Image (cartoon, grey):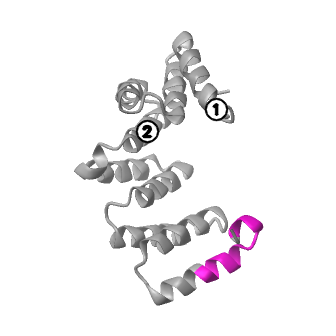
Amino acid sequence: LLASRGNADQALAQIEAALVVKPNDHDALLLKGAELARLKNDRAAATAALEAALVARPLSLAAHTELFVLAMESRDFDGAGKRLTEMKQNKALASNPQVLYLETRLALARGNLNAAKEVASQLLKAAPEHPLVLEMVGLVAFEAKDLPQALAHLQNAVKVVPELQQAR
């Protein structure tokens, strides 16, 4: 709440205080990483905090995802690919639809439309009603110039969540 009110320094101070008491607290490390990335734009410190969160909880999909997003935002597609490979090597994470979503996103960013279409198909089977899935599948169809399919998926996404910007 403090960070949302513009008190990033105070929010980070409270997180640091919590980490003094419990240095390996996954949730505090995850929050610290997100705050450092979004509010302070300190990617190096954010990455360190998120890596520490993964040490505390190696199966943390949230920490893996934050690290993936940091790499994507930096257009470090190799780094994002490394994060994705780490997730897919773990059976508990590999079957999660969020991992398929991230894989689709990376394939699109790399311009690998065939891979994006293949993974988007798996994603749609895994979570056919999820609005973000519908949006992503619609974006893949749009990139593939399958406009009727793109329109259908994007309209379905907007029906569920009218605020989806890319679907509009």
Earlier-in-chain disc, 1 versus 2: 2
| Residue identified by numbered label 2 | 101
Going by the numbered disc 1, the residue's amino acid type is Gln
Q: Quadrant of residue 13?
A: bottom right
Q: Does 160 sit left or right of 168 as displayed?
A: left
Q: Looking at the picture, does residue 93 appear above or below residue 27? A: above
Which residue is pictured at 43% across the width and 28% down the height? 128
Which residue is pictured at 31% across the width and 65% down the height? 58
Q: Looking at the picture, does residue 29 appear above or below residue 121? A: below
Q: CA distance from mark 1 to mark 2?
A: 15 Å
Going by the numbered disc 2, the residue's amino acid type is Tyr
Closer to us: 117 or 123: 123
- Secondary structure mostly seen in magenta is helix
- Tag 1 and tag 2, C-beta contact below 8 Å: no
The boundaries of the magenta stretch are 3-14
Which residue is pictured at 53% across the width and 23% down the height? 138
| Residue identified by numbered label 1 | 166
Which residue is pictured at 37% across the width and 53% down the height? 83
